[in-house]
Image (tube, coloured by chain):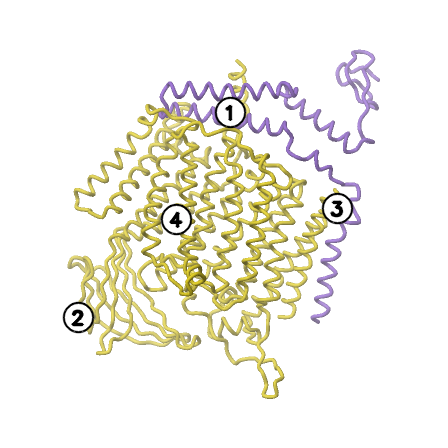
Amino acid sequence: MLTVACTLLTLAAGVYVLTPLFREARGNIEVELLAETGLDRLLARKAVVYANLKDLEFEYRMGRLSDGDFRRLEAGYKAEAAAILRELDQLGVAGDLDESIERDIAARKSRLYPSVAKETSRCPSCGAEVTVGKKFCADCGQRL
Amino acid sequence: MSDFGTFCLLLALSLSLYALFSSLLGTYLKQHRIVRSAERAALAACASIMLSLASLVYLLAAGDFSVTHVANSTSRDLPLFYKVAALWGAHDGSMLLWVFVTAGFSGIVIRQNRYRYRDMMPYVIAVLMFNLSFFLILNVFLSNPFNRLVQVLPDGSLQRFVPADGRGLNPLLQYWAMVIHPPILYLGFIGFVVPFAFAVAALITRQLGDTWIRTTRRWTLLTWLFLGTGLLLGGKWAYVELGWGGYWAWDPVENSSLMPWLTGTAFLHSVIVQERKGMLKVWNVFLVVITFLLGIFGTFITRSGVVSSVHAFADSKLGAFFIYYMLLVLGASLYLILDRLPYLKSERRLDSVLSRESAFLFNNLILLVACFAVLWGTIFPVLSEWVQGTKVTVGPPFFNSVNIPIGLMLLFLTGVGPLFAWRKTSLESLRRAFLRPVMAGAVTGAALAAAGMRNPYALVSFTLCAFVLGSIIQEFWKGAGVRAGNTGESFLRALVNLTLRNKRRYGGYIVHFSIVLIFIGLTGNAFNRESSQALAGGEEMKVGPYTLKMTGYSEGDTPSYQYGRVTLEAYKNGKRVRTMRPEKRAYKASEGQTTTEIALYSTPLEDLYVVFAGMSNDGKYEITAHVNPLVWWVWLGSGVMFLGTLLILLPDRRATGAAAQLTTAEAAAMERAVRK
């Protein structure tokens, strides 16, 4: 009885633990891609500076800060935020965050799965970028 | 069943060792499937440990006295509840509980982060499994709770042996707070392995931004809550069960759970500085390592028998292993920190002493000084034995004389810190922020002095309590005022929303408030009174404002113990308040061990605490009575602390992270303002 229970338990654990080794052969990680990027850090710092600014304003209105302190600290934070925004602009992010995220994802995808990466071409009518294999242009509706 | 239990432990050990190596191999080969397999092995190890624990619970409930642990810590007449609680009533079983909790935490973390931090997680798994394997090895090979009793026959051979009844659970442990106190304390000790594992993973992968801190913030807070709750439950138990009239005696085991709490508190504060200012990064990693090590040190103290204590399992041979383990962890962590120093560079310097950053820094230093003082006092007996050959014990006077000033300093900073602005605060701003709280403190101090209070520590403590209370009320009051002005909400509504929208800050203030309540209670110790007297029927004794009149004595018998019970009428200033019935019990299963059941009359102003110490030689009844002012506030404070921490732990409605307080619209507005 005991032997049976122990054997079953070991078998179950073995199967459970070892199956991933025989499946998911493709799912290798490309570690660098998932690491914190400089962009992540900049965005996080921007958020922090904004939160600091908001707190500062709140505390000023609570009457805890003198006018002088408030103006000096606010200017400091704003300069800091401006510096971060400049850096972000240089990375070409600040304008439309969604767009840059999309671009980033596409880039990561194409690096992970080069074969699946979508080829693009130009719409003959309006010149917008279209994915090869699409039936219509997303911009002007021209049949491709 | 007992063999099955051992088998499960062995299986868990193999699985966790497999997980340890395969997670490292997987990340080395960049083969995600190997890491997946490691994850599964870790989870399977947890399940196996759970089965093992279930076997032991079954053996305890069924009363299988062939198993050493069952025979040593239960008896037939024990209620089922205590039979199960006897799991942690002796060293071996409590070790299994420890392993179980370790496994549980590890399993939850691994499961929770299956799809996140793929680069860090293999190392997190490796650290968690390394830790789990260490404890499993100790558990299986040195303190296996499933060992069987054997007797040596006259011819020298060994034979299995089943006693008719067990030795019973230590009667001192048969109290509700004691039943939940060890598991909760374990949750607190062990939980720090999670932030520790993430810190190590962050060091190894060189990702020393805020990710590891944000990920483990809740874990840290939850663990800290468990540790604090465990401490206070232990205090409650000591107060009610041990019968010496107090709740804290600077016992080594108490100290060893206080130390990680102190460094954990420091960590909770200093991470705020890192999140906000990008400073103190090395310090934070260091604090996590120290806190984790102190948790291990606590286990070491409890289980190695190096220092004697009411709580310790003195008879175990694990000491050396713990020392090697701690040295290994310390060495490896320090190496990693030193090696990664460039990545831990501070993003800016301290601008001014008069800033919130420096208040946080002071708070950290003082917490660590307190921790060091406690550590010194705790290990001094051991060190003195090494050096001089005689064990010099350090009593409460040492701890009190060192820690009371430190505690008051901390209380002071609790009030001061939040009043400073970040970066630099001018004197004009300070005057505005401090005016009312300082007045509150000064008025209270002056009033108490005028009322005749002369104890300097108590005067300082109450003054500071009023000061801190004033600063907290001011924070809520003015904050709600500003919010009401901004949003048009009613003041009350604004107060609630303010708290809920900034749970971390205002929940933190609620915890600060609970600290004030606890300090009020602790300060009451300065006015404790005690009186012992042998009374015959009808005689009276006085203690403080109370008169106790002995009115009766009775004896009785229950299945597990015999008792003698004294009945006393308590009068306060001549008015009858309560009938007190302290007992003395002799437990049958535990070789007649006696315990005292105190009688307690607790009011917010003071506790009347009556102990029946035994019969005197001339046939009178020895009564010891304590009047302990303000103890009630300690328990109230612990309740508030619990609730305040829960409030912080409540999930945020918006995404977590540093910017949690900002909506998208606010951020956009901010961006426009900055771009101008």
| Amino acid at the residue labelled 3 | Arg
Farthest residue to the bottom: give it. Answer: B154
Hey, what amino acid is under mark 4?
A: Gly
Q: Are marks 4 and 3 on the same chain?
A: yes
Give the residue number, with chain letter if any, for mark 3.
B33
Q: Single out the mark in the foreground, 1 or 2.
A: 1
Local crowd at mark 4 within 10 Å, few (<14), some, or many (≥20)?
A: some
**Mark 3 chain:** B
Closer to the camera: disc 4 or disc 3?
A: 3
Of the residues under marks 4 and 3, which one precedes in the sequence? 3
Front residue of B499/B344: it is: B344
Per the image, label 2 sits on a secondary structure element best described as loop
Any mark on residue B361, and which?
Answer: none
Q: As displayed, is residue B459 above or below residue B190?
A: above
Q: In which quarter of the image is residue B412?
A: top left
Task: Label 1: state its secondary structure.
Answer: helix
| Number of marks | 4
Identify the chain of the residue marked 1, using the numbered disc in the image.
A
Specify the quadrant of the image occupied by residue B365: top left
How many angstroms separate mark 3 from mark 2 (CA)?
80 Å
Label 3, residues with CA under 10 Å away: few <14, some 14-19, many ≥20: many
**Disc 2: which chain?**
B
Which colour represents chain B?
Answer: yellow
Instruction: Tell me the CA gap for discs 4 and 2.
Output: 39 Å
According to the image, label 4 marks what residue? B639
Q: Are marks 1 and 3 in contact (CB under 8 Å)?
A: no
Residue occupying the point 66% across, 53% down = B42
| Residue carrying label 1 | A50
Label pair 3/2, CB-CB below 8 angstroms: no
Residue annotated with mark 2: B539
